[in-house]
Amino acid sequence: MAGHAVVIAGGGPTGMMLAAELALAKVEVAIVERSAAPDPDRARAGGLHARTIEVLDQRGVADRFLAEGKALQIQGFGRIPLDISDFPSRHNYGLALPQIQTERLLATWVQELGVPTTRGREVTGFAQDGTGVDVALSDGTSLRADYLVGCDGGRSVIRKTAGIEFPGWDASTSWLMADVEMVDKPKFGLRPGGGIGPAEGGERIRVVLPERQVEHAGEPTLQEVSEALIAADGTDYGVHSLSSASRFTDNTRQAASYRKGRVLLAGDAAHVHPPLGGQGLNTGVQDAVNLGWKLAQVVKKTGPQSLLDTYHDERHPVGAQVLQTTMAQVALTSPGDRHQALRDIMSELLTMDEPRKRLAAMMSGLDIHYDLGQGHPLLGRRMPDLDLVTANGLRRVFTLLHYARPALLNFGKPGTFDITPWADRVQLIDAEYAGVWELPVIGVVDAPAAVLIRPDGYVAWVGNGTDPGLRESLTTWFGSAMRPPG
């Protein structure tokens, strides 16, 4: 039986991002993916939001994605555009990039990091005990792991086998998505509940429209695409040559717990919702970045198992918020005069700065705030990517996080802090920054004297020139003090 520290079930964006995080921490990890190859017809996500781009920038790979995508103001709420170009971020935009390309770029990075990926097999079950998890595969073989992470989608075998409840709301609406050809070219743009536009590459047309029925036995047929077009536009434009088709609904659910013993959930295995606003892939990738460094420390025994509970504590509320915003967008985009009245009012409201910034920050992930207690506004929020003056020259904050190592930045007198017991785990950097500190929505905040940044880029501690609470924070997030040799 082959052994690994961590086995990840599912090689989509969430699974690959988690694998990369663990590999950066030098943890032995393997991915098991049921599909023999990525399926472009099942890859629905069309882009990356600002915070996800920042996360990739923290790991030094954002340029790969930016080179293949198109930076645009793609953020919206219920198809009401939200401009974030005035947000304090280097990446105050979204990136139009088909999921199939995102997956290819992540797969290349994971391969460079040496993570083995087994395709064409899937996890069919597991049994966990006090020391690990026996993972059964579809070909009759098995793996032994310290931990198993289910990144295997909304129908997650891992979640079901673990017996984790998946409460939520049943589907009330169904949409079809199809790539077709048409005799007569339609007007591209949004329709109530959907839209028509160019497909990726070639002359084909992509149709995304609501259906009259919620329950369906299989994938959409050409006849059903025709009926949806007639319902929306009064004509089917001579639709023909259906090349790919799929359905999605507003089924909305969230795992009651993201952890059960040595088994954890991330991405769609932990939360499913309609794709309005494009939050699914982005939320899953950020789940992985929150979990990866914590799981690595537990595996390496530098952090307690209770550290894994903070993954649920921090990411479950984020997932719950995503569920709420997607349900609101379904209501906002539904056909009918009453829903149109709601859209008109929301469209006017979102021309105002404060509502626009609040919703845009929520949708882009730039407003995420983990509850780490009272204190400076930075506490629990993303660290801005400042240009720092250090002994090694000008350094961006994000470059300090390329290898997923935490950092204590001291903006006061050099030598103020002694973190020798954590020196093998935490970087200590004396830095200067003379500019303004600004956060999305909140605005300008007081400059701190010191900040402790977690590997996921969130601020764990803020100092005012002294170190009260620093040792406790270091111990909480990065393990107990280790006595220096000698």
Image (cartoon, rainbow, N blue to C red):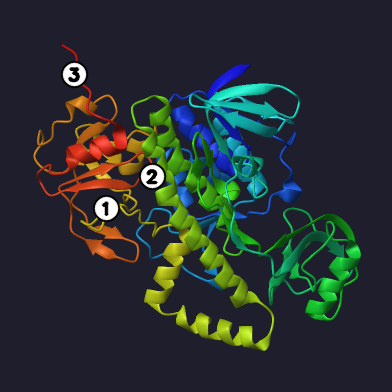
Q: Residue visible at 49% across and 24% down?
A: 131
Residue type at the position of mark 2: Thr
C-alpha separation, residue under disc 1 versus residue under disc 2 = 15 Å
Image coordinates of residue 111 in percent, x first then y, are: 58, 27
Quarter holding the N terminus? Answer: top right
Image coordinates of residue 106 in percent, x first then y, are: 57, 38
Whether residue 346 is situated above or below residue 118 in the rendered picture: below
Number of other residues with Cα within 10 Å of mark 3, as a class: few under 14, some 14 to 19, many 20 or more = few
Nearer to us in this view, 304 or 67: 304
Which residue is tagged 1? Answer: 379
Image coordinates of residue 342 in percent, x first then y, are: 56, 84
The reply to whether residue 379 is visible in this rendering is yes
Which residue is tagged 3? Answer: 484
Residue type at the position of mark 1: Leu
**Left of 185 or right of it: where is 188?**
left
Quarter holding the C terminus? Answer: top left
Which residue is tagged 2? Answer: 310
Q: Residue visible at 66% across and 77% down?
A: 334
Residue type at the position of mark 3: Pro
